[in-house]
Image: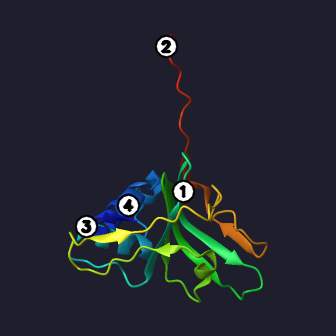
Amino acid sequence: MFDYQPNKFLRAVAGHLLAANGVPDVVTNDRTAPIDAALRQYVLNPTEGLPDKLCVYYWFYPHRRRVVMKHSLMGFFGSNGASIYGHVFKFFPFGFWFVWNEEGDRSRQFNLRRLDVSSPLISAKSQLTLDLQPLRSMNFPENPPSNDGVWLVADQYISQAEDRNQVRDK
């Protein structure tokens, strides 16, 4: 557990997530997806609260691979269309899942902590708990942990980066 400023922290994470858009995603004249429009408004306006339709979950991510998956959806077989839609953003030491307009609380099965911003003050302080156990797979949540799930995403909305092997001069 450590002290932090939730409004500043979440705005910084959301801003980096928005900046990770692919070029086609930001140069088209298409309507902006509701989750992105709400995140932009939240990030750019310090008096704006976290959108009601948005839940931000987080977990300990002890891996060097950085991952951005935008507009992804986890579906569940035999659930009459139940799904979890949003963006996933992972970089050491955090994984974040920005879930938009979730119905049915399907994400509860993963026992993730929720990043709540309860104060309207931009510099309000709080404490953040980062559970080191259970250790989740490097491929969570895109590789559903049960046999009843499927992950859907378009290639142009995924990016990942690994650390380069460093060559040392002798």
Q: Residue at x 32, y 60 (%)?
A: 12
Q: Nearer the viewer, mark 4 or mark 3?
A: 4
Whether residue 31 is visible, yes or no, is no
Distance CA(mark 1)–CA(mark 4): 15 Å
Q: Which residue position holds label 4? A: 13
- Whole-percent x and y of residue 28? 42, 60
Label 3 CA crowd tier, 10 Å (few <14, some 14–19, many 20+)? few
- Whole-percent x and y of residue 22? 47, 53
Taking the image as shown, residue 128 lies to the left or right of residue 74, namely left
- Whole-percent x and y of residue 115? 42, 73
**Disc 1 on helix, strand or loop?**
loop
The reply to whether callout 4 and callout 2 are in contact (CB within 8 Å) is: no
- Whole-percent x and y of residue 79? 72, 87
Which dot marks residue 61? 1
Q: Amino acid at mark 4?
A: Val
Distance CA(mark 4)–CA(mark 2): 36 Å
In this orientation, which residue lies closer to the viewer: 102 or 7?
Answer: 7
Q: Amino acid at mark 1?
A: Tyr
Whether residue 144 is visible, yes or no, is yes
Q: How is the image coloured?
A: rainbow
Q: Is residue 170 above or below residue 70?
A: above
Label 2 CA crowd tier, 10 Å (few <14, some 14–19, many 20+)? few
**Disc 4 on helix, strand or loop?**
helix
Distance CA(mark 2)–CA(mark 3): 45 Å
Q: Which residue position holds label 2? A: 169
Label 4 CA crowd tier, 10 Å (few <14, some 14–19, many 20+)? some
**Disc 3 on helix, strand or loop?**
helix
Q: Earlier in the sequence, mark 2 or mark 3?
A: 3
In this orientation, which residue lies closer to the viewer: 25 or 40?
Answer: 40
